C-alpha cells in the first residue's frame, strides 16, 4: 500500500467497508453540489492562515484538532483527503495530508488525481454529507515536520540546509505578492538564498488530469537545483499548501528530511525585520 496516495479504484473498493474517513477540502458550495459518498467537508484545511500574530503553530494545532474532532475523526483512523484536481487547488489536499500527519494521524493519504479522477471513472456521487459523531481529537504534533521563521533565518546562514521556494513564477520574480492579489502581502520577493522549484513541476497531465510524476522524475527535478535525497530541505510558498504538494512528492521519492514553513510568505513578508531578496532572480 502506498502510504501517501490512494488511487480511485482502491478508494472505491474500500469505501463500503466503513474503515475510511473521507475529507473533501473544496469549498462548501462545490461540496454541496456533489461529492464522493461518505465525505465530510473541511475547507479550512485550505483557507486557514497561520502566522505568529494569530498564535502560530500552537493555535493551528488547537484549531484543526477541534475541526477534526467535530468531524468525528480519531487519530487512529484511516483518512483520505481530496480536492478538485491536483493542479488547480494550490495543493489543498496535500496541505490536508500534511496537517493530519503533523497532528499525529496514523494514516493519511491523498486521492491521486483528485475529484476529477473520480469523475473520470463515472463513480457514484452524493449531495449528502456523512453523518458524524463529534469527539475529542487528541493531537500529538510531530514538530520536526515544521519550521518557524527563526528556523528559516538560521537556514539562510547554513550550508547544511537548502531553502526552496515553491511559488508560482510571478511570485518568485517579485511581480506578485501572493495568489490572493498583487498587494495582499506588503512585500514582494524571496527569502534570501532560496532555490526555485515551482510546485507544478512535481506533476504531469494524462487525459486532462494531473498526476504526480514518478520518483525518478521528481528526483531529477530536485537534482536540477542541487538537492539530493540526503539534503535537509526547508520549503515555503504563501501559506504552506503548494509546499505540501512538493513535500509529498519528495517524500514519495525518498527524500528524508523535507520540512514545511507553513506560515510561509504570508508571515515572512509582513515582518519587516526579516530579510528579503528583491532583485530579479537568475532562473
Image: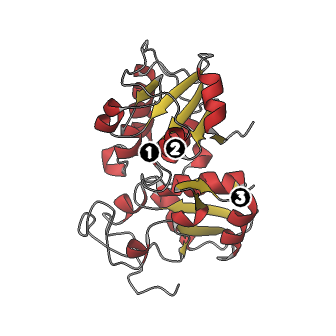
Mark nearer the N terminus (1 vs 3)? 1
Q: Which mark is residue 214?
A: 3
Residue 88 in sight from this viewpoint: yes
Tell me if label 1 and label 3 are in contact, CB under 8 Å: no
The residue lying toward the viewer, choosing from 214 and 160, is 214
Question: Where is 92 relative to 40, above or below?
Answer: below
| Left or right: where 210 falls relative to 25 | right
The residue lying toward the viewer, choosing from 238 and 129, is 129
Judge the density around disc 2: few (<14), some (14-19), many (≥20) Cα neighbours within 10 Å: many
Tell me if label 3 and label 2 are in contact, CB under 8 Å: no
| Left or right: where 168 falls relative to 117 | left
| The quadrant where residue 164 appears | bottom right
Question: Where is 244 relative to 120, above or below?
Answer: below
Give the residue number, with chain letter if any, for mark 2: 114
Judge the density around disc 1: few (<14), some (14-19), many (≥20) Cα neighbours within 10 Å: many
Residue 119 picture location, percent across and down: 49, 39
Q: Secondary structure at mark 1?
A: loop
Q: CA distance from mark 3 to mark 2?
A: 17 Å
Give the residue number, with chain letter if any, for mark 1: 84
Residue 145 picture location, percent across and down: 59, 48
Tell me if label 1 and label 2 are in contact, CB under 8 Å: yes
Q: CA distance from mark 1 to mark 3?
A: 21 Å
Question: Where is 88 relative to 273, above or below?
Answer: above
Residue 261 picture location, percent across and down: 50, 56
Q: CA distance from mark 1 to mark 2?
A: 5 Å
Q: Residue at x 59, y 45 (%)?
A: 112
Mark nearer the N terminus (1 vs 2)? 1
Q: Which mark is residue 194?
A: none
Q: Residue at x 48, y 41 (%)?
A: 115
Direction top: furthest residue = 133
| The quadrant where residue 254 appears | bottom right
Picture quarter with the N terminus: top right
Amino acid at each position: 500500500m502506498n502510504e501517501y496516495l490512494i488511487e480511485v479504484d482502491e478508494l472505491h473498493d474500500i469505501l463500503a467497508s466503513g474503515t475510511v474517513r473521507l475529507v473533501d477540502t473544496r469549498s462548501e458550495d462545490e461540496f454541496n453540489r456533489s461529492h464522493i459518498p461518505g465525505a465530510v467537508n473541511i475547507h479550512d484545511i485550505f483557507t486557514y492562515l497561520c502566522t505568529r500574530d494569530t498564535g502560530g503553530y500552537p493555535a493551528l494545532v488547537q484549531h484543526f484538532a477541534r475541526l477534526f474532532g467535530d468531524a468525528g475523526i480519531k487519530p487512529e483512523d484511516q483518512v483520505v483527503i481530496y480536492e478538485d484536481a491536483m493542479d488547480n487547488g494550490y495543493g489543498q489536499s496535500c496541505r490536508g495530508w500534511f496537517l493530519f500527519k503533523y497532528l499525529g494521524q496514523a494514516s493519511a493519504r491523498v486521492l491521486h488525481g483528485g475529484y476529477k479522477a473520480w469523475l473520470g471513472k463515472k463513480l457514484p456521487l452524493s449531495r449528502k454529507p456523512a453523518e458524524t459523531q463529534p469527539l475529542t481529537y487528541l493531537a500529538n504534533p510531530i514538530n520536526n515536520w515544521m519550521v518557524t521563521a527563526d528556523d528559516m533565518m538560521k537556514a539562510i546562514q547554513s550550508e547544511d540546509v537548502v531553502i526552496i521556494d515553491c511559488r508560482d513564477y510571478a511570485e518568485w520574480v517579485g511581480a506578485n505578492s501572493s495568489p490572493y492579489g498583487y498587494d495582499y502581502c506588503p512585500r514582494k520577493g524571496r527569502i534570501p538564498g532560496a532555490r526555485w522549484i515551482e510546485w507544478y513541476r512535481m506533476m504531469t497531465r494524462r487525459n486532462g488530469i494531473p498526476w504526480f510524476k514518478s520518483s525518478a522524475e521528481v528526483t531529477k527535478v530536485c537534482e536540477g537545483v542541487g538537492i539530493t535525497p540526503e539534503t535537509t530541505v526547508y520549503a515555503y510558498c504563501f501559506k504552506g499548501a503548494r509546499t505540501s504538494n512538493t513535500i509529498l512528492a519528495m517524500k514519495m521519492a525518498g527524500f528524508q528530511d523535507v520540512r514545511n514553513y507553513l506560515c510561509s510568505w504570508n508571515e515572512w513578508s509582513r515582518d519587516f525585520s526579516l530579510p528579503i531578496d528583491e532583485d530579479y532572480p537568475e532562473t
